[in-house]
Image (tube, rainbow, N blue to C red):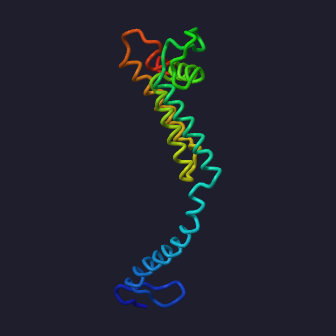
Amino acid sequence: RALCAGTRQRKFGGSETMANRRRAPAERRKKKQKRGEKRNIRTEDKKSGGPFNEAIAVVLWCLGLLTLLSLGSYDPADASLNASGSAEVHNWIGPAGAYWSDMLLQTLGVGSYALGVGVLLAGWRAFTGRRIRPGFREAAGTVLLVVCVGALAHLLLAGPDRPYPPGGVAGAI
């Protein structure tokens, strides 16, 4: 049987015009948006993080801030794991900061600053209620970023004697 132009035969009989077919998805989207608004109101409480995520966020922020402060106040004259230093510690975080910054700078070099910033960003993600633990691609990208920054620093900053290699052991490899 012949159909008029612009109509389509339905599976169960009857015909549907092209205009009706175009309107139907738009109406469905409006209904989904209305339902989504109601769902967003309910999920906003869950997205705020809750006390557990807020506690994790505070711990991560403290760890990131302490890491950046210990790296910023690194002094090669401080005692470290492989060298004895003066009894007076110049690191702002104290002896633990001196050991921590020395270990990070020797292993990762300048890339260890990226580690401190990454921990701060993980704290922000925890506070906003998003996933903290990175996926495989994010973890691999972060490791490659830290190693490549170390290698680049090792190439660009090579020259005068430094208390630690600019790219750390990771950049020297």
Q: Nearer the viewer, residue 14 or 24?
A: 24
Q: Is residue 139 above or below residue 7?
A: above
> Total of numbered circles in the picture?
0
Q: Is residue 128 above or below residue 141?
A: below
- Residue 4 occupies quadrant: bottom left
Q: Position of residue 19 (x, y in %)?
A: 37, 84
Q: Position of residue 130 (x, y in %)?
A: 55, 52
Q: Position of residue 98 (x, y in %)?
A: 55, 20
Q: Is residue 129 above or below residue 38?
A: above
- Which residue is rendered at x = 51% and y = 39% of the image? 120
Q: Is residue 114 above or below residue 9?
A: above
Quadrant assignment for the N terminus: bottom left
The residue sitting at the front extreme is 88
Q: Position of residue 13 (x, y in %)?
A: 52, 89
- Which residue is rendered at x = 40% and y = 79% of the image? 22
- Which residue is rendered at x = 37% and y = 9% of the image? 160
Q: Nearer the viewer, residue 147 or 98?
A: 98
- Which residue is rendered at x = 52% and y = 84% of the image? 11
